[in-house]
């Protein structure tokens, strides 16, 4: 498995997708810097909020591109036979590649996080807003939540790639999963709050959302930006349960991927 991790790290860093999406991430950080000028009272809050959204989008996209490059395209190009020629189990390949993606995600999040810190500080160098944002522990905890969010999406993409015969499928399904998982919390809260009195809407979509919640995790629970933005620290129990949810879903998705890949016939 160690060799798969190393080769995955090397291929991920050298890949054009990494360079292109990381550049996109830096551009989004630049947008966060410029957005500070649209709020004369709370420029740091606006810049940090937009920056977190940009980092989440970039990390998810990067993780899915890496899964596509390191697994899906190897299968499509038939170079998977070289990897399977090693005297190791197929599960080592899947887990090794996922670990490489996770390590690359940590590297990318560190670069983007430091860039966002610099952008927020530079945008308001001569301005002190009334309610200061927390750029210390709260910032890094929030960034860790976004990283864990992307890791869940990557695990789903990995599971899809072990069964897919089309290289773009993990990317497409992974993005759909990321969007759906993020929107699930807001949708559930809206329906639970009565849907503004729309009984027909609740009757039509309530059972469907309930079913979706059984198979799709609520990724919005990993978004803790209200802590650094407004000082609203999440409850330790809620934070712990969110992390447990993410880790459990990663384990389930990877287990499915390992089982499918072990039984797959290549020709």
Image (cartoon, grey):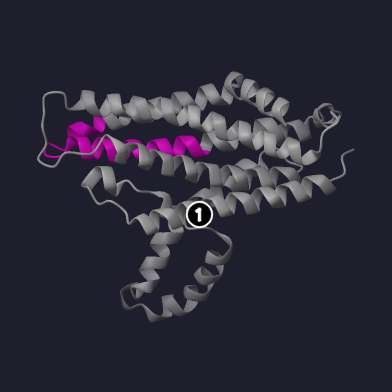
Image quadrant holding the N terminus, namely top right
> Is residue 259 rendered magenta in the image?
no
State whether residue 125 appears in this view.
yes
Question: Nearest the camera: 120 or 176?
Answer: 120
Q: Does 79 appear above or below 204?
A: above
Q: Quadrant of residue 125?
A: top left
State whether residue 182 appears in this view.
no
Question: Which percent across, then down, holds residue 53?
Answer: 37, 41
Q: Quadrant of residue 194?
A: bottom left
Which secondary structure, mark 1?
A: helix
Q: Determine the residue positioned at 41% across, 35% down.
A: 55
Is residue 11 toward the left or the right of residue 22 in the image?
right
Q: Determine the residue positioned at 45% across, 23% down.
A: 23
> Is residue 49 rendered magenta in the image?
yes
Question: Which percent across, then down, holds residue 202?
Answer: 43, 76
Q: Determine the residue positioned at 55% across, 46% down.
A: 153
Q: Residue furthest right?
A: 267
Crowd band around label 1 with a 10 angstrom C-alpha radius: few (<14), some (14–19), many (20+): few
Q: Residue furthest top?
A: 14
Question: Nearest the camera: 171 or 102?
Answer: 102
Question: Which percent across, then down, holds residue 50?
Answer: 31, 39
Q: Label 1 belongs to which residue?
A: 244
- Span shown in magenta: 34-60
Question: Nearest the camera: 12 or 267?
Answer: 12
Q: Does 220 appear above or below 106?
A: below
Is residue 198 toward the left or the right of residue 8 in the image?
left
Is residue 124 toward the left or the right of residue 157 in the image?
left
Image quadrant holding the C terminus, namely top right
Dominant secondary structure (helix, strand or loop) of the stretch shown in magenta = helix
Question: Which percent across, then down, holds residue 103?
Answer: 55, 31
């Amino acid at each position: 498995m160690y060799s798969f991790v190393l080769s995955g790290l090397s291929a991920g860093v050298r890949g054009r997708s990494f360079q292109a999406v990381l550049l996109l991430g830096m551009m989004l950080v630049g947008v966060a810097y410029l957005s500070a000028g649209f709020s004369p009272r709370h420029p740091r809050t606006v810049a940090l909020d937009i920056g977190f959204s940009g980092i989440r989008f970039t990390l998810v996209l990067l993780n899915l591109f890496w899964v596509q490059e390191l697994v899906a395209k190897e299968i499509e190009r038939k170079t998977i036979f070289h990897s399977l020629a090693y005297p190791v189990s197929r599960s080592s390949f899947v887990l090794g590649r996922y670990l490489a993606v996770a390590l690359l995600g940590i590297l990318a999040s560190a670069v983007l996080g430091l860039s966002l810190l610099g952008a927020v500080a530079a945008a308001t160098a001569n301005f002190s807003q009334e309610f200061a944002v927390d750029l210390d522990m709260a910032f890094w905890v929030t960034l860790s939540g976004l990283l864990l969010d992307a890791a869940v999406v990557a695990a789903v993409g990995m599971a899809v790639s072990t069964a897919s015969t089309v290289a773009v499928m993990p990317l497409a399904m992974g993005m759909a999963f990321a969007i759906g998982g993020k929107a699930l919390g807001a949708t559930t809260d809206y329906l639970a709050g009565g849907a503004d009195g729309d009984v027909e809407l609740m009757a039509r979509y309530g059972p469907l959302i309930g079913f979706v919640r059984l198979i799709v995790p609520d990724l919005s629970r990993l978004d803790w930006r209200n802590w650094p933005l407004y000082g609203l620290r999440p409850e330790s129990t809620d934070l712990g349960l969110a992390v447990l949810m993410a880790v459990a879903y990663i384990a389930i998705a990877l287990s499915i991927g390992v089982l499918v890949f072990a039984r797959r016939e290549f020709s």
